[in-house]
Every structure is written in C-alpha cells, then in structure tokens.
Amino acid sequence: MIRIGALVSGGGTNLQAIMDAIDRGEIDGKITAVVSSKDGAYALERAAARGIETAVMRKKDYKTSQDYDKALALFFKERDIDLIVYAGFMLILGPDFVNCFENRMINIHPALIPSFCGKGYYGLHVHEAVLKKGVKVTGATVHFVTAECDAGPIILQKAVEVKDDDTPEALQRRVMEQAEWIIYPKAVSLFAQNRLEIKDGVVKIKEK
C-alpha cells in the first residue's frame, strides 16, 4: 500500500475522486497528508472529514521560492510519502521540490496535452481557450510532473466532445465528469501497482 500526499488550492474535486476510488478498493493506497497553498480551501475540509492530516503552507510566508519548495519537500519526506498528487494546485514548484520526488508526482490537466497547456492555462482559462479555438474534441491528461509546466511524460488521456452551445463552465463540468474523475484515480492505481514505466520520456503501462 502506497502513502499518498496531495497538493491542493481549491475545492478538491479530483482529491474527492481519488478518495472515493480508495474507498471502493480500486487503489492500493491511502492519502495520509493534504497540503493547501492557501487558507480556506474546501479540499482541506474534504480531507479533514476523513481524518487525513492537513496543513496550509503559503508561499508568501517564505522569504524565497526556494525556501518554500524546500519546506514543502521536507513536509512530505518526513511523512514517507510515496506519491504526490496535484489536485487543483495552483503553484508551479521549482527544482528544489521536483527533484526530490522525481517520477513520483502526477498532475491532471483539463485538456489534451500538448494542446492548451503550459503557463496561463489553468481552470476556466483552458476551457475558454478551447471554445475560442473552435476545436471539436477536448479532454483531460494525467502526466508526471517535471520542472517544466505541463511537460512531463503522459500517463493517461481521455477525450470529451465539445458541443456547439458549450459555455466554459459547462465544458469544465463535462470534462471533469467524463474524463478527470475517471482517469486520475486510474493513474494513481497504476502507479500503486508499479505498472508505469518511463522510457525515453514516454510512459509505458506494464501488463499485470
């Protein structure tokens, strides 16, 4: 059983999806710590309701970005975390954090990478850009986290239809329901089963 740490900034719907999958026995692991980048994130309430340790670590409380990254890394190291999941975490962390957990951090992005990703593409901004471009298919991508935003090896993707009458909010909800909440728990499960292999920057899923 793996020990999972989560990074959050908001409502924590993907955190909830992972916790629900654990409850259903679909993931051989448990979430043992959840850290928010800001006060008042509802994700913290979701975690606390299940008796999971929570903490708030605000970047502005540290002198430098490096200090913040090191403190965050130490927090998870002290708790023997095997996997860190980004569940709506709105900060980009630097090498001092990323290098400590290489190939042990995953994120979900609400589009089909390499489209509509990178700096500035987060939350509703992604879906607004999708609609503005007029693409017919969008979706979600689970990937390993690297120092470069949204550029880590892709683990899973799932497509979602874009409808003519979509608003950014409606599209966001459908992407969550039809893609994010399905493939994120699945990717965590695959990691827990040690079935993810990275070769030349490409993820291969090993057979059971």
Image (cartoon, rainbow, N blue to C red):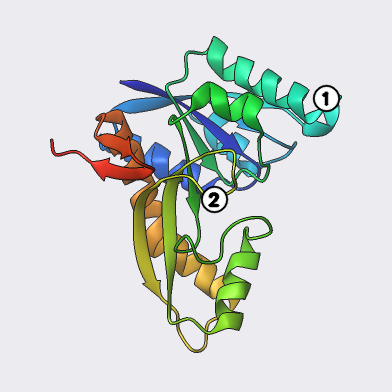
Residue 24 is drawn in which quadrant? top left
Task: Give the x, y percent position of residue 103.
Answer: 43, 31
Return the mark for residue 172.
Answer: none
Kindly report the distance in space between the C-alpha atoms of the residues bearing marks 2 and 1: 25 Å
Which residue is farthest front?
200
Task: Give the x, y percent position of residue 191.
Answer: 32, 33
Q: Which of pointers 2 and 1 lies earlier in the amino acid sequence? A: 1
Return the mark for residue 62.
Answer: 1
Position of residue 1 in the picture relative to residue 76 (left or right) = left
The three-letter code of the residue at mark 1 reads Tyr
In the depicted structure, whether residue 109 falls above or below residue 44:
below
Task: Give the x, y percent position of residue 192.
Answer: 30, 29
Q: Residue at x 34, y 52 (%)?
A: 156
Residue 92 is drawn in which quadrant? top right
In the depicted structure, whether residue 168 falls above or below residue 92:
below
Of 70 and 6, the residue lying toward us: 70
The three-letter code of the residue at mark 2 reads Asp
Q: Which residue has dot 2 on it?
A: 150
Q: Which residue is drawn at 35% across and 22% down?
A: 2
Residue 76 is drawn in which quadrant? top right
